[in-house]
Amino acid sequence: MVTVAGRHVRRGLLYRSGQTSPLGNTPFDDLSRLDFSVVADLRFPDEAVAAPMPWPRATAGKVLAITGTGEGGTAPHHAFVRTRFTAVQGVRERYLEFYDGLPSDPRYMALIVRTLAAAAQAEGPLLIHCSAGKDRTGIVCGLILALLNVPIDAILADYMLSAVPEATRALRPEILRRIEAHGLGHPDEDILEAMLTVEPDYLLASFAAIEREFGSLGAYLAAIGAEPPVANRLRRRLLK
């Protein structure tokens, strides 16, 4: 991946993933062997309890998790599996709303700045993950790539890897289980497919929200507490 200045993002230092169980299909041993210096877990506490990531002790101390959810905090995207959508457009509108709101959500802002600061100081690879590895993870990884000055077309191409058939097929059984657990039955196939995939407009909605509310990515980073030296150190570490 090449930046606008012609520099290259180093391979083997930035990873994104879903959880390994029950949604994920990446063998956990494969992740453990990568010896991450920082793990940003974007899941809410209820998700982490339901599907723990059994990190070895050496990695467990490097996991950064979301805080400030209050008692019984429930991940906001759970609204997707509790809603009886009647049209694909309804799914898209809900996703656009979610992507628009996440960058300014104080809970995620706090975790993003902690992740950037820790990653800037670390020497090894960085893993960012949520439950499915496509929405929250897609936004945060997109922000990091933008910070590295990767062109938006390349950022979107990386993000759209979450829409390949292998990725949506891996999510399908658990998403269906969650929908049916709320008594909603099996949704129409086109609606289910819309829930499982991503679209470029979703990630663009996050960038547009940052531009609208903060003026620029640099101003956003300053607003969440990521001082310029953090961005500079990240560029030195992740670019060649």
Image (cartoon, rainbow, N blue to C red):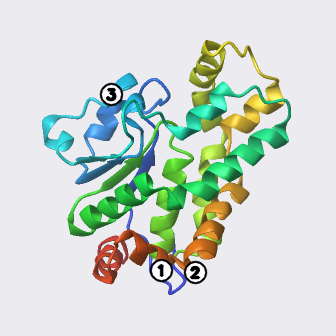
Q: Left or right of 226: which side holds 124?
A: left
Tell me where residue 231 appears, x and y as whole percent. Answer: 35, 77
Query: Label 1, on which residue?
Result: 219
Quadrant location, the C terminus? bottom left
**Which of the marked residues, 3 or 2, is nearer the chain's N terminus?**
3
Residue 71 % position (x, y): 36, 33
Residue 61, given in percent of the width and then of the height, sits at 16, 44
Q: How far apart are marks 1 and 3 (CA)?
A: 35 Å
Disc 2 crowd rating (10 Å Cα; few below 14, some 14-19, many 20+) is: few
Secondary structure at numbered mark 2: loop
Instruction: Using the image as rendered, state which of residue 80 and residue 189 is in the foreground.
Output: 80
Looking at this view, name the residue that lies furthest to the left.
58
In the rendered structure, are the residues bearing label 2 and label 1 in contact, judged by CB atoms less than 8 Å apart?
yes
The residue lying at 29 percent from left, 32 percent from top is: 29
Real-space Cα separation, disc 3 to disc 2, in angstroms:
38 Å
Residue at point 42%, 25% (across, down): 21
**Amino acid type for the residue under numbered disc 1:** Ala
Q: In this view, does 67 lie to the left or right of 24?
A: left
Mark 1, secondary structure of its residue = helix
Residue 224 quadrant? bottom left
Residue under numbered circle 2: 215
Q: Closer to us: mark 1 or mark 3?
A: 1
Q: How many marks?
A: 3
Q: What residue type is labelled 3?
A: Pro
Q: Nearer the viewer, residue 131 or 215?
A: 215
Q: Mark 3 points at which residue?
A: 52
Residue name at image x 68 percent, y 51 percent = 97
Residue 81: x and y in percent read: 64, 27
Number of other residues with Cα within 10 Å of mark 3, as a class: few under 14, some 14 to 19, many 20 or more: few
